[in-house]
Amino acid sequence: MSGPVEAQRSPFLELQQSDWDAMVAELRSAFLGARDYARGRQGGRIVFVSAAAAARPIAGAALEAVAGAFLTTTAQVAAVELAEQGITANVVVPALEPDAQAVDAVVGFLVSDDARGVTGAVIAADGGFSITKQSTPSPLLDEPA
Amino acid sequence: MGRLDGRVALVTGAAHERGIGRGIVRELAAEGASVAVVDVAHEEMGEALAAEVGGRFYPADVSDRGQVDELVERVESDLGPLDVVASNAGVADWQPFTEITDESFDRIVAVNLTGAFNVGQASAKAMVRSGRPGRIVFTSSVHVQMPFATMAVYGATKQGVRALCEAMAVELAPHGIRVNHIGPGWVLSALNDPSPAVADPEELKKSLATIPIEQRPADPRELGRAVVYFASSDGDYVTGEYLRVDGGFVVGTFS
């Protein structure tokens, strides 16, 4: 279990190298953590908490979008490869301002026995944020970057 | 009359004779663009390609931000303000998920993801500076639509590039800059040389047989023509978009 993705929010053109590097360090530890967890293990659950911006862009949230997208495909490839070890890998997508309770409830389901047949899934726990058209204007930026 | 007469283009991962980048360079040049051929290696092939298309070869490592900033500055001073940038450099490894090495993870992320950010942000800044409504095209992959076993890091970096592209499309639209990505399927590029399918002729035959169009890999120039579409006025109203050029590989039947 890793997440939610936290990364510097900033207009794209103003992102600093250090912001980028911090985001990469975060996805690196999530990825390699999942790899280490799965080594030699029979049965298990991997859950990544992604980011609202990962599936559809939100101005000012490029870094968490990249990290969430990265972890989404990581989970899906892991789901394919780790099925024979009885390990599932799934993704929970929080709202732009994550609601910990809503996320935890879905994570709780994904690690439960009821979810043994669920793998490679991307489940939004975002109050419907992802199905609304909220990318422009961005709730994060005062004016166009 | 080419569709890109007078435009200045930069293509990364461009030198290798079997690579997608070379196909992009040739198609951009065929439409009249002056092309900066960029690669971290393959200098001889890069010089020869640059000579063939009347462009210039620039050695640079996209994973190094300092080198990328310097590259953009040199290209603009040699050829003029950037109009078209194809961020295409990429690397891959094939390793089972639990056996992925730290080194492989770091290398693929540095080139495919950090390299895309470096090239994307540096060129966007240059376009904003010069006031040009430029075009940025990333090479992603069919991996953004489906997972492939033993290629978790590669696939994840490409999904990251997809998200980066969309974020840039939204934020750079006020500057007139369009940002899109192309999705190659099978290309017999050097990148794919170490893949188990390429190593085994029977495997390769089986995989190619799942491609609906002519059961063949892409000619890199077919990817190049997709970049020309995004870069030319044909792509004026297109941003944050994905153009899969895979002969139908993704929609084809898997076996």
Image (cartoon, helix red, strand yellow):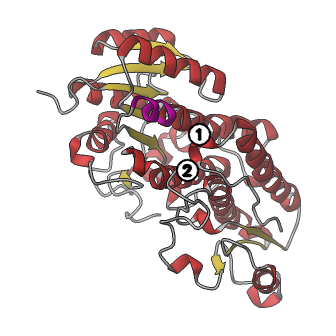
Q: Give, as a single range, the part of the protein colored magenta.
A: B124-130
- The question of residue B125 being in magenta is answered with yes
Residue B146: x and y, percent?
52, 62
Residue marked by disc 1: B117
**Would residue A1 be seen by someone viewing this image from the given angle?**
yes
Residue A78: x and y, percent?
70, 62
Q: Share a chain, discs 2 and 1?
A: yes
Residue farthest along the left direction in this orientation? B1
Identify the secondary structure beneath mark 1.
Answer: helix
Residue marked by disc 2: B164
Chain letter of mark 2 equals B
- The question of residue B154 being in magenta is answered with no
Q: Nearer the viewer, residue B29 or A121?
A: B29
Residue at the spot 73% in from the left edge and 44% down from the top edge: A19
Which quarter of the figure is the N terminus of chain B placed in? top left
The crowd level at tag 2 (other Cα within 10 Å; few <14, some 14-19, many 20+) is many
Examine the residues drawn in magenta and state their main secondary structure: helix
Q: In this view, does A73 lie above or below B172?
A: below
